[in-house]
Amino acid sequence: MSQTERTTGTQVQLMMTCLCDTFFDSVAQATVEVLEHVGCNVEVPEAQTCCGQPAFNSGDWDSTRKVVRHTCKTFDARKPTILPSGSCAHMVAHGYDLAFEKEDDLGEVQTFSKSVWELCDFLVNGLGVERWPGRFDAKISLHRSCHTRGTQTYQSAVKLLSSIEGVELVEFDESEQCCGFGGTFSVAYPNTSVSMGKLKIEMLTASKPDIVGAVDMACMMHLSGIAQKQGRPLNKLHVAEILMKALRNGQKQ
């Protein structure tokens, strides 16, 4: 999908995702604060549920289509819909096409897909934000989620974080390695999933960062759960939370 085909503007809608709704409400709050800082008016449709990815990944495409049709009905495709999740944004951008390939309402679903952005991608490529104000004194290793490959999400997150005064982004080995979550993969293959997670934690923390950052809460949940079991909790933040904290720190100066 080319950038010129995508819906942009400052009247936006927030798709919180299931994980924000259930475990990471702070990420939803930070996303709203970040969007409002750049001049957006944020709507949060109450009827929203899920993007449909769990059913899609399980092969239950009939259930997927029910969820997707509800989502398309709930959100206004004339306005950008912003997700603080590269994984869910990828599901809308690519999974919806596959699930509706032979359906009569494919066009309606594709119209909605063009309105959906991951947060960092929207800030940089939808609104043209080049630098982020404020200050955040921390050494950060930024986890690259598998579902952000082929998108501008990771590069956008790096651009924003690198521009914040006080932030040091650190490189680490095997940065392209999956964390092992993979949604239903972690349920179907728990031993492999945990082994991959342990290796990822070793890589992410090798340079002793202050913060492990991520653009996907699912990866954060998986890695922090393993780390907690190991007795070495991760100091983790979603990128939206880092942007919000930088803003607040800047206001104190």
Image (cartoon, grey):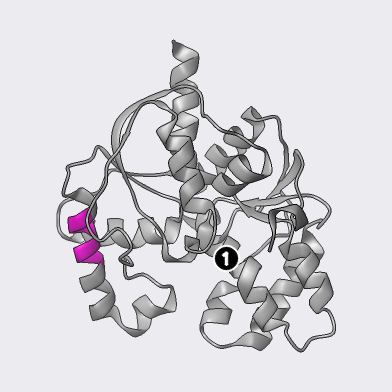
Is 18 drawn above or below residue 211 in the view shown? Answer: below
Residue at the (30%, 40%) spot, across then down? 140
Q: Is residue 201 magenta?
A: yes
Residue 67 makes an appearance in the image:
yes
In the picture, the quarter occupied by the N terminus is: bottom right
- Residue found at x 35% / y 53%: 143
Can the viewer see residue 51?
no
Residue stretch rendered in magenta on the structure: 197-203
Q: Examine the image and state in which quarter residue 191 appears.
A: bottom left
Left or right: 175 in relation to 205: right
Residue 252 in the image: state x and y as whole percent.
Answer: 45, 13
Asked where in the image residue 127 lies, by quadrant, the reply is top right
Picture coordinates of residue 38 (x, y %)? Answer: 65, 30
Q: Amino acid at mark 1?
A: His
Q: Residue at x 79, y 50 (%)?
A: 79
- Farthest residue, direction top: 253
Rendering coords of residue 221 (x, y %)? 37, 58
Q: For the C terminus, which image quadrant? A: top left
The foreground one among 154 and 32 is 154
Dot 1 falls on a residue whose secondary structure is: helix
User: Crowdedness of circle 1 by 10 Å Cα count: few (<14), some, many (20+)?
Assistant: many
* Magenta-span inclusion, residue 124: no
Q: Which residue is mark 1?
A: 90
Q: As displayed, is residue 190 above or below residue 176?
A: below
